[in-house]
Amino acid sequence: MTAIPSSGSVEIIVNKFDTSLAQGQILVDFTADTIDNNEVVFKVGDLKPNQYYLIKKEGVDYLTKQADSSGYIQFSNSQWSTKTFTIEETSSSTTITPCDTYNIDGIPGIQFEEVVKAISDYIVEDAITKDDAIEVIICYFTK
């Protein structure tokens, strides 16, 4: 597992890392902290290739990612105080969409700033896929 902040440092405490457990059980549990607005890109490996994984932040569904052919998922966070993330295997990607993930201001629909964040996560941070960025853009134009 790696955690790369856009600036400064990030403190990581790994509470659990056992990717051999069954679907629905928590495989990875870690706590992270850095300064607010510091984008941290997390990359977790040793997962089943092409399988879907549910990521929870503070016990709440955050997003679902499909592992690549090497068994890695990647996601990011920039809203900080100490946060706990868990990862568990799931059966599909329908739990959380990129539009759900980037709709962080509580206003219905995707806002312009949220589109900019998704594009930055794709182009600059390499934290989401091109398809995820496009999905956020489509949500913005179809609100």
Image: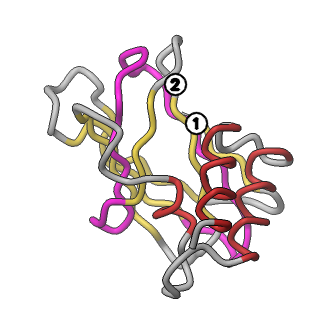
Residue at 52% over, 61% down: 99
- Magenta range is 33-61
Front residue (pair 100, 47): 100
In the rendered image, which quarter is residue 136 located in?
Answer: bottom right
Counting residues from the start of the chain, the first of labels 1 and 2 encountered is: 1
Position of residue 102 measured from the top left corner of the image (x, y, whole percent): 57, 66
Decide: is 70 above or below 24: above
Instruction: Identify residue for label 2.
Output: 72
- Amino acid of disc 2: Tyr
Q: Quadrant of the C terminus?
A: bottom right
Which secondary structure, mark 2?
loop
Front residue (pair 131, 65): 131
Front residue (pair 134, 64): 134
Q: Does residue 102 belong to the magenta stretch?
A: no
Q: Does residue 50 belong to the magenta stretch?
A: yes
Instruction: Identify residue for label 1.
Output: 43
Query: Which label belongs to residue 27?
Result: none
Position of residue 110 measured from the top left corner of the image (x, y, whole percent): 60, 73
- Amino acid of disc 1: Lys
